[in-house]
Image (spheres, helix red, strand yellow):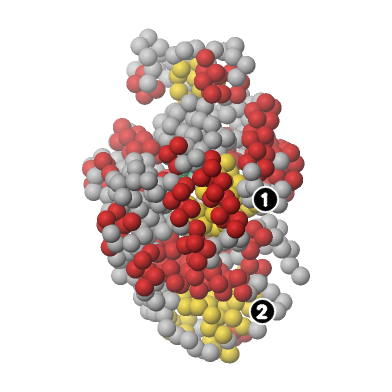
Amino acid sequence: QFDRAWWKEAVVYQIYPRSFNDSNGDGVGDIPGIVEKLDYLDELGVDVVWLNPVYESPGVDNGYDIADYRSINERYGTMADWEELLAGLHERDMRLIMDLVVNHTSDEHEWFQRSRSSPDSEYRDYYIWREGRSLGEAGVSAAEFDPADYHLPEGVYELPPNDWESFFGGSAWTYDEETGEWYLHLFDEKQPDLNWQNEKVREAIYEMMEWWLQKGIDGFRMDVINLISKPEGLPNGEDSDAIVRGADQFVNGPNVHEYISEMHDRVISDYDAMTVGEMAEVSVEEAKKFGEDGMSMVFNFDHLRLDFGPEGGRWSKGEWTLDELRDTLTEWQKGLEGDGWNSLHFNNHDEPRMVSRFGNDEEYRRESAKLLATLLLTLKGTPFMYQGEEIGMQNYPFESLTEVRDVDTLNNVRVARQSGRLESEEEVLDLVQYRSRDNARTPMQWHDDEHAGFTEGDPWMPVNPNYTEVNVAAARRDERSVRRYYRHLLSARDEHDVFVYGDYVLHTTDHDRVWAYSRVTPDAELFVVLNVSSATTTYAPPANVVGEAEFLVGNYNTPLGRINDTLDLRPWEARVYLLD
Ligand code: ISL
Protein backbone atom coordinates (compact mmCIF):
# COMPACT_ATOMS: atom_id res chain seq x y z
CA GLN A 1 0.00 0.00 0.00
CA PHE A 2 2.73 2.48 0.92
CA ASP A 3 6.11 3.11 -0.61
CA ARG A 4 7.85 1.93 2.53
CA ALA A 5 11.44 2.51 3.63
CA TRP A 6 13.02 2.01 7.04
CA TRP A 7 14.31 5.55 7.06
CA LYS A 8 10.83 6.95 6.49
CA GLU A 9 9.59 5.12 9.57
CA ALA A 10 12.59 5.98 11.73
CA VAL A 11 13.05 8.75 14.26
CA VAL A 12 16.62 10.01 14.42
CA TYR A 13 18.34 11.17 17.60
CA GLN A 14 21.37 13.39 17.10
CA ILE A 15 24.30 13.06 19.47
CA TYR A 16 26.86 15.81 19.81
CA PRO A 17 29.56 13.64 21.37
CA ARG A 18 31.50 16.46 23.00
CA SER A 19 28.51 17.32 25.15
CA PHE A 20 26.62 14.08 25.65
CA ASN A 21 28.33 12.05 28.35
CA ASP A 22 31.92 12.03 29.60
CA SER A 23 33.11 8.64 30.81
CA ASN A 24 36.69 9.48 31.75
CA GLY A 25 36.45 12.78 33.57
CA ASP A 26 38.39 14.92 31.08
CA GLY A 27 35.43 17.25 30.69
CA VAL A 28 34.71 16.24 27.12
CA GLY A 29 32.04 13.73 26.17
CA ASP A 30 33.21 10.51 24.52
CA ILE A 31 32.13 7.33 22.79
CA PRO A 32 32.25 5.06 25.84
CA GLY A 33 30.00 7.69 27.42
CA ILE A 34 27.49 7.16 24.62
CA VAL A 35 27.73 3.38 25.03
CA GLU A 36 26.74 3.83 28.68
CA LYS A 37 23.56 5.51 27.52
CA LEU A 38 22.40 3.05 24.88
CA ASP A 39 19.63 1.70 27.07
CA TYR A 40 18.52 5.22 27.70
CA LEU A 41 18.11 5.77 23.95
CA ASP A 42 16.38 2.45 23.50
CA GLU A 43 13.93 3.23 26.25
CA LEU A 44 13.19 6.62 24.74
CA GLY A 45 12.12 4.86 21.57
CA VAL A 46 14.35 6.40 18.90
CA ASP A 47 15.55 4.31 15.96
CA VAL A 48 18.66 5.92 14.53
CA VAL A 49 21.58 7.79 16.02
CA TRP A 50 23.29 10.48 13.98
CA LEU A 51 26.72 11.05 15.44
CA ASN A 52 28.44 14.38 14.83
CA PRO A 53 32.06 14.06 13.64
CA VAL A 54 34.30 11.97 15.88
CA TYR A 55 37.25 11.75 13.49
CA GLU A 56 40.78 12.93 14.15
CA SER A 57 40.71 16.71 14.11
CA PRO A 58 42.44 19.74 15.59
CA GLY A 59 38.95 20.70 16.76
CA VAL A 60 38.76 24.28 15.54
CA ASP A 61 35.15 23.64 14.55
CA ASN A 62 34.54 20.80 16.99
CA GLY A 63 35.35 18.08 14.50
CA TYR A 64 34.00 19.63 11.30
CA ASP A 65 37.67 20.13 10.50
CA ILE A 66 38.79 16.59 9.78
CA ALA A 67 42.44 15.62 9.65
CA ASP A 68 41.91 11.92 8.99
CA TYR A 69 38.64 10.49 7.73
CA ARG A 70 39.38 6.93 8.73
CA SER A 71 40.21 7.40 12.37
CA ILE A 72 38.61 8.15 15.70
CA ASN A 73 39.78 11.19 17.62
CA GLU A 74 41.57 10.07 20.78
CA ARG A 75 39.52 12.48 22.82
CA TYR A 76 36.43 10.50 21.96
CA GLY A 77 37.93 7.04 22.27
CA THR A 78 39.31 4.35 20.00
CA MET A 79 38.10 2.55 16.91
CA ALA A 80 37.28 -0.38 19.19
CA ASP A 81 35.02 1.89 21.28
CA TRP A 82 33.32 3.04 18.13
CA GLU A 83 32.80 -0.56 17.02
CA GLU A 84 31.26 -1.32 20.38
CA LEU A 85 28.89 1.60 19.89
CA LEU A 86 27.83 0.35 16.47
CA ALA A 87 27.34 -3.19 17.73
CA GLY A 88 25.43 -1.96 20.78
CA LEU A 89 23.06 0.03 18.59
CA HIS A 90 22.51 -2.84 16.18
CA GLU A 91 21.85 -5.26 19.06
CA ARG A 92 19.06 -2.97 20.14
CA ASP A 93 17.68 -2.68 16.62
CA MET A 94 18.88 0.86 16.28
CA ARG A 95 21.06 2.18 13.50
CA LEU A 96 23.93 4.58 13.15
CA ILE A 97 24.53 7.31 10.62
CA MET A 98 27.82 9.15 10.49
CA ASP A 99 28.62 12.73 9.59
CA LEU A 100 30.22 13.06 6.17
CA VAL A 101 32.18 16.30 5.92
CA VAL A 102 33.61 16.48 2.43
CA ASN A 103 33.17 20.05 1.29
CA HIS A 104 36.38 20.74 3.19
CA THR A 105 39.01 19.10 5.35
CA SER A 106 41.18 20.44 8.12
CA ASP A 107 44.30 22.27 7.00
CA GLU A 108 46.06 19.58 9.04
CA HIS A 109 44.82 16.85 6.73
CA GLU A 110 47.71 15.23 4.91
CA TRP A 111 46.19 16.17 1.54
CA PHE A 112 46.28 19.83 2.44
CA GLN A 113 49.74 19.66 3.95
CA ARG A 114 51.01 18.31 0.66
CA SER A 115 48.87 20.62 -1.40
CA ARG A 116 50.21 23.63 0.42
CA SER A 117 53.82 22.56 0.08
CA SER A 118 54.25 23.54 -3.58
CA PRO A 119 52.30 24.54 -6.71
CA ASP A 120 53.82 21.45 -8.32
CA SER A 121 52.62 19.03 -5.68
CA GLU A 122 50.43 16.30 -7.08
CA TYR A 123 48.00 17.29 -4.34
CA ARG A 124 47.92 20.96 -5.30
CA ASP A 125 44.73 20.45 -7.22
CA TYR A 126 42.96 18.71 -4.34
CA TYR A 127 42.10 22.19 -3.08
CA ILE A 128 41.19 25.49 -4.66
CA TRP A 129 44.22 27.72 -5.11
CA ARG A 130 44.26 30.97 -7.05
CA GLU A 131 46.38 34.07 -7.47
CA GLY A 132 45.20 37.26 -5.83
CA ARG A 133 43.87 40.31 -7.66
CA SER A 134 45.72 43.56 -7.87
CA LEU A 135 43.97 46.62 -6.44
CA GLY A 136 43.47 47.98 -9.95
CA GLU A 137 41.92 44.77 -11.20
CA ALA A 138 39.51 44.74 -8.29
CA GLY A 139 38.70 48.43 -8.66
CA VAL A 140 39.79 49.21 -5.10
CA SER A 141 41.74 52.34 -4.28
CA ALA A 142 44.85 52.20 -2.10
CA ALA A 143 43.03 54.34 0.48
CA GLU A 144 40.21 51.82 0.81
CA PHE A 145 42.58 48.94 1.16
CA ASP A 146 43.69 47.63 4.55
CA PRO A 147 46.03 44.63 4.36
CA ALA A 148 45.02 43.80 7.94
CA ASP A 149 41.57 42.80 6.67
CA TYR A 150 43.19 39.88 4.93
CA HIS A 151 45.98 39.07 7.38
CA LEU A 152 48.53 39.84 4.70
CA PRO A 153 52.22 39.73 5.47
CA GLU A 154 54.26 42.92 5.09
CA GLY A 155 54.77 44.03 1.56
CA VAL A 156 51.90 42.09 0.02
CA TYR A 157 49.26 44.36 -1.47
CA GLU A 158 46.69 42.29 -3.17
CA LEU A 159 43.09 41.28 -2.84
CA PRO A 160 41.66 37.79 -2.65
CA PRO A 161 40.78 36.12 -5.98
CA ASN A 162 37.11 37.05 -5.61
CA ASP A 163 34.66 38.65 -3.16
CA TRP A 164 33.20 35.50 -1.61
CA GLU A 165 32.63 35.54 2.12
CA SER A 166 33.08 32.79 4.65
CA PHE A 167 30.04 31.59 6.64
CA PHE A 168 32.09 32.36 9.71
CA GLY A 169 32.68 35.99 8.70
CA GLY A 170 35.30 37.75 6.56
CA SER A 171 36.81 36.75 3.24
CA ALA A 172 36.54 33.12 2.12
CA TRP A 173 40.20 33.25 1.03
CA THR A 174 43.45 33.05 2.92
CA TYR A 175 46.82 34.09 1.54
CA ASP A 176 49.48 31.47 1.92
CA GLU A 177 53.02 32.75 2.29
CA GLU A 178 54.64 29.50 1.22
CA THR A 179 53.62 29.87 -2.38
CA GLY A 180 52.12 33.35 -2.60
CA GLU A 181 48.70 32.03 -3.61
CA TRP A 182 45.31 32.05 -1.90
CA TYR A 183 43.16 29.06 -0.96
CA LEU A 184 39.40 28.98 -0.65
CA HIS A 185 37.60 28.16 2.60
CA LEU A 186 33.86 28.72 2.89
CA PHE A 187 34.19 28.19 6.65
CA ASP A 188 37.16 28.80 8.93
CA GLU A 189 40.60 29.36 7.42
CA LYS A 190 41.55 26.04 8.98
CA GLN A 191 38.88 24.36 6.82
CA PRO A 192 40.12 24.56 3.20
CA ASP A 193 37.56 23.58 0.53
CA LEU A 194 38.24 20.46 -1.49
CA ASN A 195 38.27 20.70 -5.25
CA TRP A 196 35.45 18.41 -6.39
CA GLN A 197 36.32 19.04 -10.02
CA ASN A 198 39.33 16.86 -9.45
CA GLU A 199 38.34 13.28 -10.15
CA LYS A 200 41.01 12.00 -7.78
CA VAL A 201 39.39 13.88 -4.92
CA ARG A 202 36.02 12.37 -5.71
CA GLU A 203 37.51 8.88 -5.96
CA ALA A 204 39.27 9.24 -2.63
CA ILE A 205 36.03 10.36 -0.99
CA TYR A 206 33.99 7.53 -2.46
CA GLU A 207 36.54 4.99 -1.27
CA MET A 208 36.41 6.44 2.21
CA MET A 209 32.60 6.29 2.23
CA GLU A 210 32.69 2.71 1.07
CA TRP A 211 35.12 1.91 3.88
CA TRP A 212 32.68 3.18 6.51
CA LEU A 213 29.72 1.44 4.92
CA GLN A 214 31.72 -1.77 4.91
CA LYS A 215 32.17 -1.34 8.64
CA GLY A 216 28.42 -1.56 8.90
CA ILE A 217 27.08 1.96 9.28
CA ASP A 218 23.58 2.72 8.05
CA GLY A 219 24.09 5.97 6.23
CA PHE A 220 25.42 9.49 6.22
CA ARG A 221 24.40 12.97 7.16
CA MET A 222 26.19 15.02 4.53
CA ASP A 223 27.58 18.31 5.76
CA VAL A 224 26.94 21.39 3.56
CA ILE A 225 26.80 19.02 0.64
CA ASN A 226 25.27 21.45 -1.82
CA LEU A 227 28.32 23.71 -1.63
CA ILE A 228 30.72 21.26 -3.24
CA SER A 229 30.51 22.50 -6.83
CA LYS A 230 32.11 25.85 -7.54
CA PRO A 231 31.46 27.51 -10.90
CA GLU A 232 34.16 27.78 -13.54
CA GLY A 233 36.15 31.00 -13.16
CA LEU A 234 34.89 31.53 -9.59
CA PRO A 235 32.92 34.71 -10.43
CA ASN A 236 32.14 37.36 -7.82
CA GLY A 237 28.81 37.19 -6.02
CA GLU A 238 25.94 39.10 -7.60
CA ASP A 239 23.00 38.74 -5.31
CA SER A 240 23.37 41.12 -2.37
CA ASP A 241 20.62 39.30 -0.41
CA ALA A 242 22.56 36.06 -0.45
CA ILE A 243 23.19 34.45 2.97
CA VAL A 244 26.84 35.28 2.52
CA ARG A 245 28.46 37.11 -0.38
CA GLY A 246 29.02 34.63 -3.23
CA ALA A 247 26.36 32.14 -2.11
CA ASP A 248 24.51 32.70 -5.39
CA GLN A 249 27.59 31.25 -7.08
CA PHE A 250 28.50 28.30 -4.91
CA VAL A 251 25.19 27.12 -3.42
CA ASN A 252 23.87 24.36 -5.72
CA GLY A 253 26.74 25.00 -8.12
CA PRO A 254 26.77 23.76 -11.71
CA ASN A 255 27.90 20.15 -11.18
CA VAL A 256 26.37 19.41 -7.82
CA HIS A 257 23.77 16.97 -9.16
CA GLU A 258 26.30 15.22 -11.31
CA TYR A 259 28.52 14.66 -8.26
CA ILE A 260 25.71 13.51 -6.00
CA SER A 261 24.31 11.04 -8.48
CA GLU A 262 27.80 9.79 -9.21
CA MET A 263 28.32 9.28 -5.47
CA HIS A 264 25.03 7.45 -5.31
CA ASP A 265 25.81 5.17 -8.23
CA ARG A 266 29.34 4.47 -7.13
CA VAL A 267 28.76 3.96 -3.42
CA ILE A 268 25.37 4.37 -1.79
CA SER A 269 23.27 2.33 -4.19
CA ASP A 270 25.02 -0.87 -3.10
CA TYR A 271 23.73 -0.45 0.44
CA ASP A 272 20.42 -0.09 2.20
CA ALA A 273 21.59 3.24 3.56
CA MET A 274 19.89 6.50 4.37
CA THR A 275 21.36 9.82 3.34
CA VAL A 276 20.41 13.29 4.40
CA GLY A 277 22.03 16.24 2.73
CA GLU A 278 22.47 19.36 4.81
CA MET A 279 21.78 22.36 2.61
CA ALA A 280 22.46 25.86 3.80
CA GLU A 281 19.92 27.05 1.25
CA VAL A 282 17.68 24.95 -0.98
CA SER A 283 14.32 25.24 -2.71
CA VAL A 284 11.63 22.56 -2.88
CA GLU A 285 12.37 22.10 -6.57
CA GLU A 286 16.07 21.69 -5.94
CA ALA A 287 15.35 19.22 -3.11
CA LYS A 288 13.36 17.07 -5.54
CA LYS A 289 16.37 16.93 -7.82
CA PHE A 290 18.55 15.69 -4.97
CA GLY A 291 15.91 13.02 -4.42
CA GLU A 292 16.28 12.02 -8.06
CA ASP A 293 20.04 11.86 -7.55
CA GLY A 294 19.39 9.22 -4.90
CA MET A 295 19.44 11.19 -1.65
CA SER A 296 16.84 10.04 0.88
CA MET A 297 16.12 13.57 2.04
CA VAL A 298 17.64 16.99 2.65
CA PHE A 299 17.70 19.37 5.60
CA ASN A 300 16.34 22.75 4.65
CA PHE A 301 16.52 25.74 6.97
CA ASP A 302 13.70 27.93 5.69
CA HIS A 303 11.77 27.72 8.96
CA LEU A 304 14.93 28.43 10.95
CA ARG A 305 15.42 31.75 9.18
CA LEU A 306 12.07 33.22 10.15
CA ASP A 307 13.52 34.95 13.18
CA PHE A 308 16.32 36.71 11.32
CA GLY A 309 16.14 40.48 11.15
CA PRO A 310 15.57 42.31 7.87
CA GLU A 311 19.30 42.93 7.59
CA GLY A 312 22.31 41.13 8.94
CA GLY A 313 21.03 37.60 8.32
CA ARG A 314 21.75 35.13 11.06
CA TRP A 315 23.54 37.75 13.15
CA SER A 316 20.43 39.83 13.65
CA LYS A 317 17.16 39.26 15.39
CA GLY A 318 13.60 39.46 14.09
CA GLU A 319 10.14 38.27 15.05
CA TRP A 320 8.62 35.12 13.57
CA THR A 321 4.87 34.71 13.21
CA LEU A 322 2.74 31.59 13.25
CA ASP A 323 1.58 32.45 9.75
CA GLU A 324 5.11 32.33 8.41
CA LEU A 325 6.00 29.15 10.27
CA ARG A 326 2.84 27.41 9.06
CA ASP A 327 3.29 28.62 5.49
CA THR A 328 6.93 27.67 5.32
CA LEU A 329 6.50 24.17 6.68
CA THR A 330 3.31 23.68 4.66
CA GLU A 331 5.11 24.63 1.48
CA TRP A 332 7.59 21.79 2.10
CA GLN A 333 4.90 19.36 3.21
CA LYS A 334 2.89 19.92 0.05
CA GLY A 335 5.85 20.48 -2.21
CA LEU A 336 7.34 17.04 -1.63
CA GLU A 337 4.04 15.16 -1.39
CA GLY A 338 4.33 12.02 -3.50
CA ASP A 339 7.53 13.33 -4.99
CA GLY A 340 10.23 13.29 -2.38
CA TRP A 341 10.57 12.96 1.37
CA ASN A 342 10.93 15.58 4.10
CA SER A 343 13.24 15.68 7.06
CA LEU A 344 11.80 17.42 10.11
CA HIS A 345 13.94 19.32 12.59
CA PHE A 346 13.86 22.30 14.92
CA ASN A 347 17.06 21.66 16.80
CA ASN A 348 20.59 20.69 16.04
CA HIS A 349 24.08 21.57 17.20
CA ASP A 350 24.06 24.79 15.11
CA GLU A 351 20.75 26.19 16.23
CA PRO A 352 19.52 27.80 19.41
CA ARG A 353 17.20 25.58 21.47
CA MET A 354 13.73 25.35 19.95
CA VAL A 355 11.84 25.93 23.17
CA SER A 356 13.62 29.26 23.66
CA ARG A 357 13.05 30.20 20.06
CA PHE A 358 9.63 28.94 19.01
CA GLY A 359 8.17 28.20 22.43
CA ASN A 360 7.95 30.03 25.73
CA ASP A 361 10.85 28.92 27.88
CA GLU A 362 9.66 30.78 30.95
CA GLU A 363 6.06 30.30 31.95
CA TYR A 364 5.27 27.46 29.55
CA ARG A 365 8.57 25.68 29.01
CA ARG A 366 7.04 22.28 29.49
CA GLU A 367 3.85 22.87 27.54
CA SER A 368 5.54 24.58 24.62
CA ALA A 369 8.31 21.96 24.42
CA LYS A 370 5.58 19.35 24.17
CA LEU A 371 3.72 21.29 21.52
CA LEU A 372 6.88 21.51 19.44
CA ALA A 373 7.45 17.79 19.96
CA THR A 374 3.95 17.20 18.63
CA LEU A 375 4.69 19.21 15.53
CA LEU A 376 8.00 17.43 14.96
CA LEU A 377 6.46 13.99 15.31
CA THR A 378 3.18 14.49 13.46
CA LEU A 379 4.21 16.34 10.33
CA LYS A 380 5.09 14.12 7.39
CA GLY A 381 8.77 13.24 7.17
CA THR A 382 11.63 11.76 9.15
CA PRO A 383 11.96 13.54 12.50
CA PHE A 384 15.39 14.46 13.84
CA MET A 385 15.59 15.06 17.57
CA TYR A 386 18.63 16.61 19.16
CA GLN A 387 20.05 15.56 22.54
CA GLY A 388 18.37 17.37 25.42
CA GLU A 389 15.30 18.21 23.39
CA GLU A 390 13.51 15.35 25.11
CA ILE A 391 13.84 17.08 28.47
CA GLY A 392 13.11 20.55 27.15
CA MET A 393 16.63 21.97 27.43
CA GLN A 394 16.78 25.68 26.70
CA ASN A 395 19.25 28.37 25.70
CA TYR A 396 22.17 29.23 27.95
CA PRO A 397 22.15 32.56 29.77
CA PHE A 398 25.55 33.80 28.51
CA GLU A 399 26.87 36.59 30.68
CA SER A 400 30.13 37.14 28.89
CA LEU A 401 31.90 36.26 25.67
CA THR A 402 34.44 34.30 27.69
CA GLU A 403 31.79 31.61 28.06
CA VAL A 404 31.60 31.21 24.28
CA ARG A 405 33.64 28.46 22.60
CA ASP A 406 32.15 28.47 19.13
CA VAL A 407 34.41 29.64 16.28
CA ASP A 408 31.39 30.78 14.26
CA THR A 409 30.09 33.01 17.04
CA LEU A 410 33.49 34.44 17.89
CA ASN A 411 34.45 35.16 14.28
CA ASN A 412 31.11 36.66 13.36
CA VAL A 413 31.04 38.85 16.43
CA ARG A 414 34.52 40.10 15.64
CA VAL A 415 33.59 40.94 12.06
CA ALA A 416 30.30 42.59 13.07
CA ARG A 417 32.18 44.75 15.55
CA GLN A 418 34.86 45.73 13.08
CA SER A 419 32.26 46.83 10.58
CA GLY A 420 30.39 48.73 13.30
CA ARG A 421 27.20 46.71 12.82
CA LEU A 422 27.32 45.62 16.43
CA GLU A 423 28.49 48.23 18.89
CA SER A 424 27.66 47.95 22.55
CA GLU A 425 28.52 44.99 24.73
CA GLU A 426 24.79 44.54 25.48
CA GLU A 427 23.92 44.28 21.82
CA VAL A 428 26.56 41.63 21.34
CA LEU A 429 25.54 39.58 24.36
CA ASP A 430 21.88 39.87 23.51
CA LEU A 431 22.51 38.38 20.09
CA VAL A 432 24.89 35.73 21.39
CA GLN A 433 22.30 34.64 23.95
CA TYR A 434 19.72 34.36 21.26
CA ARG A 435 21.73 33.00 18.37
CA SER A 436 24.98 31.35 19.34
CA ARG A 437 25.42 27.76 18.31
CA ASP A 438 26.80 27.18 21.80
CA ASN A 439 23.24 27.36 23.12
CA ALA A 440 22.82 23.85 21.81
CA ARG A 441 26.24 22.66 22.91
CA THR A 442 26.05 22.94 26.68
CA PRO A 443 26.38 19.55 28.35
CA MET A 444 23.46 17.14 28.47
CA GLN A 445 21.68 17.32 31.83
CA TRP A 446 21.43 13.84 33.34
CA HIS A 447 20.72 14.56 36.99
CA ASP A 448 21.04 17.24 39.63
CA ASP A 449 24.54 16.44 40.92
CA GLU A 450 27.46 18.66 40.11
CA HIS A 451 27.88 19.33 36.36
CA ALA A 452 24.53 17.66 35.81
CA GLY A 453 26.16 14.24 35.81
CA PHE A 454 27.80 14.99 32.47
CA THR A 455 31.34 14.75 33.80
CA GLU A 456 33.33 14.25 36.96
CA GLY A 457 35.91 16.73 35.72
CA ASP A 458 35.57 20.29 34.50
CA PRO A 459 33.12 20.45 31.61
CA TRP A 460 34.51 22.00 28.40
CA MET A 461 31.39 24.17 28.24
CA PRO A 462 29.44 25.49 31.20
CA VAL A 463 26.34 23.54 32.21
CA ASN A 464 23.05 25.40 32.01
CA PRO A 465 22.28 26.53 35.58
CA ASN A 466 18.74 25.22 35.24
CA TYR A 467 20.09 21.66 35.43
CA THR A 468 18.91 21.27 39.01
CA GLU A 469 15.39 21.33 37.68
CA VAL A 470 15.72 20.26 34.06
CA ASN A 471 17.42 16.86 33.93
CA VAL A 472 16.77 13.27 32.93
CA ALA A 473 16.50 11.90 36.46
CA ALA A 474 13.87 14.47 37.39
CA ALA A 475 12.04 13.77 34.13
CA ARG A 476 11.92 10.08 34.93
CA ARG A 477 10.21 10.75 38.24
CA ASP A 478 7.71 13.16 36.80
CA GLU A 479 4.59 11.90 35.08
CA ARG A 480 4.11 15.17 33.27
CA SER A 481 7.65 15.45 31.97
CA VAL A 482 8.56 16.42 28.44
CA ARG A 483 10.42 13.14 28.17
CA ARG A 484 7.40 11.08 29.05
CA TYR A 485 5.48 12.96 26.39
CA TYR A 486 8.09 12.15 23.76
CA ARG A 487 7.93 8.48 24.71
CA HIS A 488 4.17 8.53 24.33
CA LEU A 489 4.30 10.17 20.95
CA LEU A 490 7.11 7.94 19.75
CA SER A 491 5.23 4.80 20.63
CA ALA A 492 2.00 6.10 19.08
CA ARG A 493 4.02 6.79 15.96
CA ASP A 494 5.25 3.21 15.95
CA GLU A 495 1.74 1.86 16.20
CA HIS A 496 0.01 3.81 13.48
CA ASP A 497 1.16 4.00 9.89
CA VAL A 498 -0.76 7.21 9.40
CA PHE A 499 1.96 9.10 11.34
CA VAL A 500 4.46 8.10 8.69
CA TYR A 501 2.54 7.76 5.47
CA GLY A 502 -0.55 9.94 5.86
CA ASP A 503 -0.86 12.92 3.51
CA TYR A 504 -0.76 16.33 5.11
CA VAL A 505 -4.01 18.32 4.92
CA LEU A 506 -3.97 21.85 6.35
CA HIS A 507 -7.11 23.15 8.10
CA THR A 508 -6.17 26.56 9.45
CA THR A 509 -4.88 28.96 6.90
CA ASP A 510 -5.35 32.20 8.78
CA HIS A 511 -5.91 31.57 12.48
CA ASP A 512 -3.28 33.63 14.27
CA ARG A 513 -2.85 31.19 17.17
CA VAL A 514 -3.98 27.82 15.98
CA TRP A 515 -2.38 25.42 13.56
CA ALA A 516 -4.62 22.44 12.79
CA TYR A 517 -4.02 19.74 10.22
CA SER A 518 -4.83 16.18 9.44
CA ARG A 519 -2.74 13.32 8.21
CA VAL A 520 -4.76 11.08 6.00
CA THR A 521 -4.44 7.57 4.59
CA PRO A 522 -7.26 5.62 2.96
CA ASP A 523 -7.91 3.89 6.31
CA ALA A 524 -7.21 6.46 8.97
CA GLU A 525 -7.03 10.11 9.84
CA LEU A 526 -4.91 11.81 12.43
CA PHE A 527 -6.22 15.17 13.56
CA VAL A 528 -3.67 17.51 15.13
CA VAL A 529 -4.53 20.83 16.75
CA LEU A 530 -1.96 23.18 18.22
CA ASN A 531 -2.40 26.45 20.07
CA VAL A 532 0.90 28.08 19.23
CA SER A 533 0.60 30.87 21.78
CA SER A 534 0.67 31.66 25.49
CA ALA A 535 -3.00 32.72 25.49
CA THR A 536 -6.17 30.67 25.61
CA THR A 537 -8.09 30.54 22.38
CA THR A 538 -10.95 28.80 20.65
CA TYR A 539 -11.05 26.99 17.38
CA ALA A 540 -13.83 25.38 15.36
CA PRO A 541 -12.53 22.27 13.61
CA PRO A 542 -13.83 21.26 10.17
CA ALA A 543 -17.15 19.40 10.22
CA ASN A 544 -15.67 16.14 8.97
CA VAL A 545 -13.52 15.65 12.08
CA VAL A 546 -16.19 16.60 14.64
CA GLY A 547 -17.57 13.59 16.50
CA GLU A 548 -16.22 10.37 17.97
CA ALA A 549 -12.45 10.11 18.01
CA GLU A 550 -9.71 8.50 19.99
CA PHE A 551 -7.65 10.98 21.97
CA LEU A 552 -4.09 9.73 21.41
CA VAL A 553 -1.77 12.26 22.97
CA GLY A 554 -2.02 15.74 24.41
CA ASN A 555 -0.11 18.01 26.76
CA TYR A 556 -3.02 18.78 29.08
CA ASN A 557 -5.37 16.36 30.72
CA THR A 558 -8.31 16.03 28.34
CA PRO A 559 -8.97 12.41 27.63
CA LEU A 560 -12.11 13.20 25.62
CA GLY A 561 -13.62 10.54 23.44
CA ARG A 562 -14.85 13.05 20.92
CA ILE A 563 -13.95 16.21 19.05
CA ASN A 564 -16.44 19.00 19.77
CA ASP A 565 -17.47 21.61 17.25
CA THR A 566 -15.66 24.23 19.29
CA LEU A 567 -12.38 23.55 21.03
CA ASP A 568 -11.20 25.67 23.94
CA LEU A 569 -7.46 25.50 23.88
CA ARG A 570 -5.18 26.36 26.76
CA PRO A 571 -1.74 28.02 26.36
CA TRP A 572 0.46 25.89 24.08
CA GLU A 573 -2.11 23.11 24.11
CA ALA A 574 -1.49 20.31 21.63
CA ARG A 575 -3.87 17.42 20.93
CA VAL A 576 -3.63 14.49 18.61
CA TYR A 577 -6.74 12.46 17.78
CA LEU A 578 -7.19 9.35 15.71
CA LEU A 579 -10.28 8.97 13.55
CA ASP A 580 -11.23 5.84 11.69
O1 ISL B 1 25.71 27.65 11.76
C1 ISL B 1 25.00 27.89 10.83
C2 ISL B 1 23.58 28.20 10.99
O2 ISL B 1 23.21 28.18 12.29
C3 ISL B 1 25.45 27.76 9.45
O3 ISL B 1 26.04 28.82 8.91
C4 ISL B 1 26.27 26.53 9.40
O4 ISL B 1 27.60 26.83 9.43
C5 ISL B 1 25.90 25.78 8.16
O5 ISL B 1 24.56 25.38 8.33
C6 ISL B 1 26.76 24.56 7.95
O6 ISL B 1 26.84 23.75 9.07
C7 ISL B 1 27.62 22.62 9.01
O7 ISL B 1 28.90 22.84 8.48
C8 ISL B 1 29.78 23.66 9.24
C9 ISL B 1 29.83 23.28 10.70
O8 ISL B 1 30.46 24.30 11.42
C10 ISL B 1 28.46 23.04 11.28
O9 ISL B 1 28.53 22.64 12.61
C11 ISL B 1 27.79 22.04 10.39
O10 ISL B 1 26.55 21.60 10.88
C12 ISL B 1 31.13 23.53 8.61
O11 ISL B 1 31.48 22.18 8.50
Camera-near label (2 vs 1) is 1
Task: Give the crowd class for mark 1: few <14, some 14-19, many >=20 residues within 10 Å.
Answer: some
Element assignment for label 1: loop
Visible in this render: residue 60?
yes
425 vs 478, left or right, is left
Q: Quadrant of the N terminus?
A: bottom right
Residue 190, horizontal then vertical, whole percent:
45, 29
In this rendering, the count of numbered labels is 2
Residue 344 circle label: none
On the image, the x and y values in percent for residue 565 come to: 52, 88
Q: Position of residue 204 (x, y in %)?
A: 65, 30
Measuring 62% from the left and 16% from the top, which residue is drawn there?
122
The reply to whether callout 2 and callout 1 are in contact (CB within 8 Å) is: no
Q: Is residue 173 above or below residue 98?
A: above
Picture quarter containing residue 229? top right
Q: What element does badge 2 sit on? A: loop
* Residue 357 seen in the figure: no
User: Residue lying farthest top?
Assistant: 155
Q: Residues within 10 Å of mark 2 (few under 14, many from 20)?
A: some
Which residue bears the numbered disc 2? 524
Depth order, front residue of 205/170: 205
Left or right of 151, for residue 285: right
Q: Nearer the viewer, residue 25 or 258?
A: 25
Q: Which mark is residue 273?
A: 1
x and y, in percent, of residue 360 in the image: 35, 66
On screen, 227 above or below 122?
Answer: below
Q: Residue at x 66, y 68 (%)?
A: 501
